[in-house]
Amino acid sequence: MKGGSGEFEVVPAVDLRGGKCVQLRQGRKEEVIFSSAESPVEIARHWVEQGASRLHIIDLDGAFQETKNNSAVVKKIAESVGVSGVSGVSGVRGRAKIQVGGGIRSYERAVELLALPGVERIIFGTAALKSPRLVERVAREFGSERVMVALDVRGGKVAVDGWRETTGLDAKEAAKQAEELGAGSLLFTNIDVEGLMQGVETEVVAEFVRSAGVPVVVAGGVSSAEDVERVREAGASGVVVGSALYTGKLSLENKV
């Protein structure tokens, strides 16, 4: 399916670990390729000031099931840059819509995040496979447009639990299941190229987007403006960019 009726979005990633903004290589928590001493709130504000209309916030500690999570930081970011009344609102200067995920494994946590300023949708990963009724309930009660399911894919198969375990489930089949649960959008991450900044695997992306029945946002491997354009041409509704922005290989100003 094509990206939907909205404009193609370039979405900065704000990945949180231990209260800091980081970037990991292929999701391995021991392979940190970027860590900023700057406050994640200031980093988020910087991307919004550069023109980002949406932020992609992931609590990596939550995803890795660590004892501590980054709930307080997520809340501060939302209060600082989240646009109020997200439904139907875009282009508010100094504010952005937010999609947030990482370790959302309970209804209570889902509701808590959905109530934060600017949070347009929450991202379910492992829970979509291990707790499908949770995803179904949130989609039913809050609307499919507020539920995104992340499919983290390695070698065509879905990985779970912070990418540590690869299942035997085919990505396209997982997408179909997510749509049946009520997901209004999908996040497709190609782990094989994530964090490497060596380019996207265009045909892999295009094939997945064609098979999906809802808008798809793509992550993994983006290293240049050309990669962003390839993802757009593949029919995705947006692209999440992390390492390329933080290392200066890609400028947000001329891509949004």
Image (cartoon, rainbow, N blue to C red):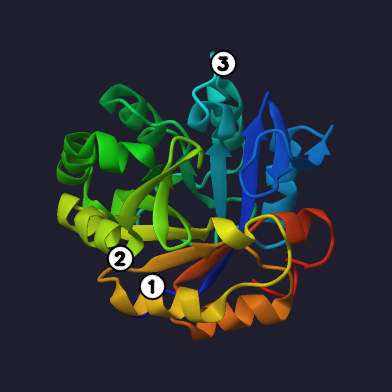
The answer to whether residue 148 of the structure is visible from this angle is no
Residue 208 is left or right of residue 198, and the answer is left
Q: Secondary structure beneath disc 1?
A: helix
Q: Secondary structure beneath disc 3?
A: loop
Q: Nearer the viewer, mark 3 or mark 2?
A: 2
Q: Are the residues tagged 2 and 1 within 8 Å (C-beta)?
A: yes
104 or 174, which is in the foreground?
A: 174
Query: Residue tagged by mark 3?
Result: 68
Residue 188 falls in image quadrant: bottom left
Where's the N terminus, which quadrant?
Answer: bottom left
Number of numbered discs on residues: 3
Query: Residue tagged by mark 2?
Result: 172
As measured in the structure, the alpha-carbon distance from the residue carrying label 2 to the one carrying label 1 is 7 Å
Q: Which mark is residue 208?
A: 1
Q: Which mark is residue 102?
A: none
Q: Earlier in the sequence, mark 3 or mark 1?
A: 3
As measured in the structure, the alpha-carbon distance from the residue carrying label 3 to the one carrying label 1 is 34 Å
Residue 57 spot, x, y in % from top left: 56, 43
Residue shown at 55% from the left, 40% from the top: 58
Residue 41 spot, x, y in % from top left: 69, 35
